[in-house]
Every structure is written in C-alpha cells, then in structure tokens.
Amino acid sequence: MPLDPVIPFEPVSTEQIPEGDRWIAQVKWDGVRILTYSDGNEVRLFNRKRHERTMQYPELSDVARYCRAKSVILDGEMIALSDGKPSFHEVMKRDSLRKPQTVAAMVRHVPVTYMIFDMLYLDGRWVTGLPLEERQRLLRETVVQDERIQLVQNVSDPAALFAVTHAHDLEGIVCKHLDSLYAIGGKDPRWRKKKHFKDLLAVVGGVTLRHGTVNALLLGLYDENGDLIYIGHAGAGKLTVADWRAVTERAAALATGQRPFRNRPGRDKDAIWVKPELTVKVRFMGWTPDGSIRQPTIQGFVDAPDAACTFGQTP
Amino acid sequence: MHTLWKGAISFGLVHVPVKMFAATEDKDISMKYIHKVCGTPISYVRRCNHCEEDVEWEQIARGYEYEPGKFVLFEKEELDALSESSKEIKILDFVDLNEIDPIYFQKTYYLSPADTGANAYSLLLEALRQTGKIGIAKVSIRSKSSLAAIRVIQDCIAMETIFYPDEIRPVRQVPNLPDNPAVNEKELTMAKMLIEQLSVPFEPEKYKDDYRENVMEMIQQKIAGEEIRVVPEQPKANVIDLMAALQASLEAVKPSKVPAERGQPADAKPKTQKKPKAKETVS
C-alpha cells in the first residue's frame, strides 16, 4: 500500500481554556486513536504508535460505505460505550484481540463507533497543509455518518463544553484553532486538551487477594534512577470478575519473594509481590502530598513495556 | 489437572504431603434455561419478598429452621470454625477393601505427592500395595468433614469419600421386599445357567452413554438445520443519543448562542446515514 502510516498530531495539556473566536472545542472521546488509510485498493488501520489494527475493526474496512473518496486518510477515536458512555476498558476488549477467529463474535458483543475528527489525505493529495476549517469542510463533504461513523462536532464555547462534559462524566475537551495546519508527528499548542482527571500507565508490583482472587493491584512508577516507587493501590474499577481471575493467574506466574518497590507500601503485610511486568492504564483525580494517586481506578490492561511506566511519562 | 486441595495424609507419626485432584468428571450435557419467547438465557435473582428487593451475597447469612418460620443464623466463618483442621487426611484404621460395601463409596479423588513428599508418598503406596489394605481416614474438604478410604489405583494413591453409616438408609425401609422367598429349584437352575452364559470379564470401555450421544447428535442436527436461537442483542447505548444529550446540555447552558456559529460540523444534531451531513450544514 503506497500510504505509509504516520504518527498523528497530538494536543498538549492545558489548564487554561483558550479564548477567541478562532478557537473551537471538541469532546475528547475516550477510546483508542485510530487512523484509517485507504488507497483505493486496500484499507488498513493503524494506531498512533503505527501498530496495525485492521483486523480488530473489520466494520471499518469498507471505507466506500461511509466515505466518498477514491483515497483517504482519516483520523479519529475508536470508542465503545458502556452504560451510555465511552469506556476505554470496553474498547480495549476489541483493540486487544489478537486471534482473527475471535473478532467476529466480539464485533457483535462490543460494537464500536469511529469518531472522526480530521483528514490528512484526500483523492491523491495531502491536505495536512490546509487549515482545520478547510479540512473539516472536506470531512463533511466526504464522510457519510451513521450509527457507527460520526464526525466529532465543533462547539464554539469551549468553557461551556468543558462544563457539559464534566456533567456528563466524559473525559474532557480538545480545543483546536480553526487556522491550524495538521502537523504529522507533531505535538504543539495549536491543539490543547483539558481533562477532568488524569491518566497514566503504571506497572503492577504487587497484588492482594481475597478468597484466593486478586482484589487490588499495588501500582508503581519508575523514577529517574530506575527505582520502582509505589504510588498507590487500585481495586475493581472497570474490571470484571473474569478479568480478576485472569489477573490472578498472571500474578501467580510473576510472583516473587522480593518487594519490587523501593518504598514500603502501606498494605505490604498482605501483599504478594510480583515481577513488574503487568502494565495498566489507571485513571486518578490527582496526587496526594505524600506522592500517592487519589481515587485510582484501573481502566484496563495495556500492551506496554514496564519501562514506559515512569514519572516522566506525558500525561 | 486442577488442584482441589493441598494437605497431608497422616498415620501414626508418618506425614505425607499431598495434592488432591478429582478422579472423575461429569459428562452430562449441560443446558441452560432459555426464555422461549425471545431466546434470552434466564437469569436467577436472589430476592427478598419482604423487602421487595434483590439481595447481594453480602446481605445473606445461613439460617437453620429449628421450627417453622424460626431460624438461628450462622455466618460462614462460624461454620468454618467448627470443622476440624482441614489440612489433614487422618488415617484411623486399616481394613480390607472387600469389607466395605460399594454403597459406601461417594466420590473418588487422586492424591499426588506435594513438593516435598515424594519419598513418604512412595513408602505409603508400597506398604498399602504389599499389605493389600486400605486406610479409613477422616478428612474435611471445604468445611465439610467426611469419612474416606485411602487405597491404591495403579501407581497412584486415591481417596474415596465414603458415607457415614447413618447416611445410608437400611434395606428394611424398602417396601415390598418378600419376607420368605420361595424359589422354584428348576427356575433357579435356569437363571443361574443364563447368568453363566452372560458372564464376561468387566470391560468398561464397551459401555457407552447412548443418551448423551443421541442428544449430541440432535444438537448437531439442529445447528446444521439452522434450528438455532440467538440471544437478542441488548439494546446498546448509541453514541448518537449521547451526542444529542450533550447538545441539549449545551443549549441549556447557553440558550442564546445556539445553534452553531461559523457553520462548523458542530452544534448541529448528529445525523444518520440517510441524511448525509454535508448537504445540511454547509455554511
């Protein structure tokens, strides 16, 4: 396929919501960033790390169904709903599929919606050099929306959208300048995100058990010296009983007598230490003065190396 | 095989650490209860008719009904505390196998040596084999205590749980057993001859569960004939509904500024496939 996957444009985090009538805000849909590449013959999907996800989302392979273009690159967020809201944990049930034979059943069980917010390429030419306003016009002209394909909408009042997303318990907003060009591989303040909570990747260094099943994970991050520092423990979150059973098995295989954390966790009496290999996405409200995370919930297990779980990781 | 229990066999001063495994498995074809009308599996709820609510396990205790409508309650922990040490299969006596009527046997488990117990295990196995005896033991598994027979099956020590004598109903309770059986000698000779003719060595492999095979075959036929019921899709929440709810909230926040400024894809209600957006929101 002539279209090589690219690294998509990323927003920076901001506390200040930008003002001015050339700024629009969009809901920050909580899912997996997916770019769709269609060269007219073939359609392939890649995530922002350029890992292929074509197999996981077969319902998007028929681009002609929802996009009137000979060739195109679309950028958006793949989401799955749980209790009426986008759930990272839910979409990971699709994103983490590795066996083709299990995909068909999961397409039925976990339907996804592709929330498209940008276009990089259209009918043989790159459109990344056009302003956002223009790219959005092209999106509206080419993409046919349905229940599974939606264009992310602009809202002219970012502060109002931020309040509304909070009321609806959504992740946050992304503010974009209407004149901004699309910077492949870039990350700069032309796009600014503001979230209602924080997320990070943490590595599991210990577990506690209840009736023989894991009921909480002891989480850590690596500091600049490479030492693993305990940052708190998290319980059920979005994980199901079946998830916990699976965790119990994986924890058993990683069990070690050695405490992997440099500091001593509060719950270390009941803890079973594990080799720091299992990584999770954890959502939390902020940091306590003693360096623990507040109200953490596990969003899901992620396919990331433990070395990615550092204090320095970008929020 | 999946370890059901870990503990030790003890007799006298000998202590044999073992792990326990189920020796038999139930191959009945399991079927779920399905609502005929729509094909959805029936779910069971634990419900309190007095409070008119569904009850979580945390809210549930066990109660013994000592007279109708009156209960004494127990927590699981209280019952667990009453059972004897659950880590031990304690052999009390050794007997000959043919002294135990098969009616006593309940369920069979295999025992294998735990990490450190290989020598003691082999010793017990060989001693049982050479004496031809089996051990009668007391064991508690999952807070229920049982009597058990410890015997050798091929090169493995096995444990058969056996009923306590008061759990076995006496034969005299069976109705209609003749008091003074009168048997015709000639007929008896015939019957014995017939038994002789049909006598063979026991070859369990030649007996099959015909019913199970028939059911399995019918399942395959129904699948092949597409005579199948699929669970109806739960009505899934729809992102369009969510976007409409967000839009309504936005309008409530800023009644004067909606709809859309600057003709963005924004601020207009999300559309379905039949109504391509491009036609409607071009600025």
Image: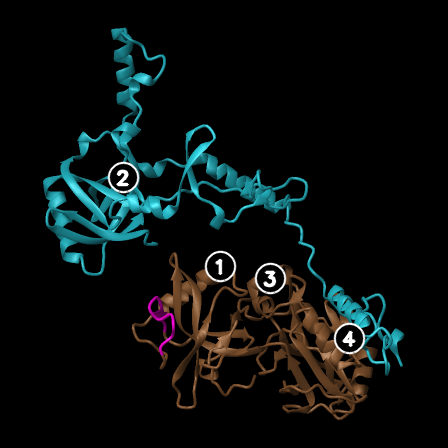
- Marks 1/4: CA–CA distance: 38 Å
Q: Taking the image as drawn, is residue A40 in sight? A: no
**Mark 2 vs 4: CB contact within 8 A:** no
Q: Amino acid at mark 4?
A: Cys
**Is disc 3 placed on a helix, strand or loop?**
helix
Magenta segment range? A264-274
* Res B115 → quadrant: bottom left
Name the residue type under label 1: Ala
B229 relative to A159, above or below: above
Give the labeled residue for mark 3: A106
- The letter of the cyan chain is B
Sequence-wise, which precedes: disc 3 or disc 1?
Answer: 3
Q: Chain of mark 4?
A: A
Q: CA distance from mark 2 to mark 3?
A: 45 Å
Residue A121 lies in what quarter of the image? Answer: bottom right
Mark 4 or mark 3: whose residue is earlier in sequence: 4
Residue in the image at 75% along x and 64% along y: B241
The residue under label 4 is A67
